[in-house]
């Protein structure tokens, strides 16, 4: 899953990584690490940092861009376990726009380097779960840079993928908005990838981690126990429905083949409605 989608993407991103390293007066060391479909590339650098470059289509990038990790550095408490930003460089490459971040190098590996969902129990210690709870609590107090999950998206997606009308999203909290196993390291926990953070529906972050854990019941049970104070409330159940709708939309695009039956089963348990059958050909982009 985490590799460039074609050789053109590979060449573009490797060139961008080299350009960013030169502009930030550093040198990369070792083989690059790829993000989803090659939209990001990263490498360790001399001096003990990590250089990460993100690429987006210029036509789909707003003129006023959200500054994810830069605003996280400014607004998010140090009680949130995350890498810190040391330098930032953006440039326009014509058809594409690029953003390079020079951040702390994190030595411990992510829990799931290949996919966002979990396939086996990582046997995380109690200290890891305590750090996760403390980080999400501290993050909730930060001023969000944006509203991440929009009501208009829910109104469109819920009938198609859950078979029910979307609930009104009335309560939000500042969250990471991409809390899944490819963005969380083994102990000691560090939460990675701050591009999307913002105001999310209450319960959405722990629910997203939960639904990405359904193939490993022991971990799924642990998440529900750790976050029962949110997930077991009516407003938290809306957050879980939203996480399921997002995941089933991804299933419709061809992702999460092994996880899909469990997502549908959980959606039916939560809503009382069997989700519509969806194939990748049926899904809208």
Image (cartoon, grey):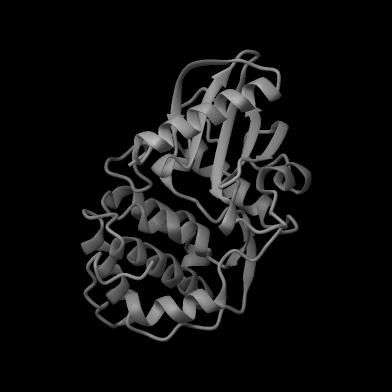
The residue sitting at the bottom extreme is 165
Q: How many marks?
A: 0
Residue 123 at least partly seen:
no
Along the line of sight, which residue is nearer the eye, 53 or 162? 53
Q: Looking at this rendering, what residue extends furthest in the front direction?
A: 94
**Above or below, 259 relative to 101:** below
The residue depicted at 24 percent of the width and 71 percent of the height is 278
Where residue 172 appears, as percent x and y from the top left, is: 63, 69
Which of these two is toward me, 32 or 119? Answer: 32
**For the C terminus, which image quadrant?**
bottom left
Give the percent coordinates (x, y) of residue 127: 52, 36
Rendered residue at 42%/72% (across/down): 241
Quadrant of residue 51 within the rendered picture: top right
Nearer the observer, 131 or 148 = 148
In percent of the image, x 52 and y 65: which residue is there?
Answer: 203
Residue in the picture at 57% in, 23% down: 18
| Observer able to see residue 40 | yes
Q: Is residue 19 left or right of residue 180?
A: right
Quadrant for the N terminus in the image: top left
Residue 87 in the image: state x and y as whole percent: 73, 30
Query: At which x and y percent is residue 199?
Result: 64, 63
* Placement of 121 over or under 108, stated as above or below: below
């Amino acid at each position: 899953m985490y590799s460039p989608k074609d050789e053109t993407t590979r060449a573009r991103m490797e060139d961008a990584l080299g350009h960013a390293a030169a502009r930030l007066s550093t040198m990369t060391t070792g083989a690059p690490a790829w993000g989803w479909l090659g939209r990001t590339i990263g490498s360790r650098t001399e001096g003990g940092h990590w250089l990460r470059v993100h690429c987006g289509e210029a036509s789909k990038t707003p003129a006023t861009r959200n500054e994810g990790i830069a605003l996280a550095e400014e607004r998010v408490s140090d009680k949130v376990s995350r890498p810190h930003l040391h330098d930032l460089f953006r440039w326009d490459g014509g058809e594409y726009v690029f953003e390079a971040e020079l951040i702390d190098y994190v030595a411990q590996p992510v829990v799931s380097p290949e996919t966002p969902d979990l396939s086996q129990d990582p046997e995380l210690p109690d200290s890891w779960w305590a750090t996760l709870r403390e980080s999400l609590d501290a993050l909730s107090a930060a001023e969000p840079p944006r509203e991440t999950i929009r009501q208009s998206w829910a109104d469109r997606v819920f009938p198609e993928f859950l078979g029910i009308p979307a609930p009104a999203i009335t309560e939000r909290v500042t969250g990471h908005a991409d809390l899944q196993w490819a963005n969380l390291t083994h102990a000691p926990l560090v939460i990675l990838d701050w591009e999307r953070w913002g105001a999310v529906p209450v319960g959405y972050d722990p629910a997203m981690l939960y639904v990405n854990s359904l193939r490993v019941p022991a971990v799924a049970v642990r998440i529900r126990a750790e976050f029962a104070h949110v997930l077991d409330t009516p407003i938290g159940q809306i957050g879980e429905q939203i996480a399921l709708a997002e995941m089933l939309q991804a299933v419709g695009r061809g992702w999460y083949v092994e996880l899909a039956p469990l997502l549908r089963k959980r959606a039916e348990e939560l809503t009382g409605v069997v989700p519509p059958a969806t194939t990748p050909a049926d899904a809208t982009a």
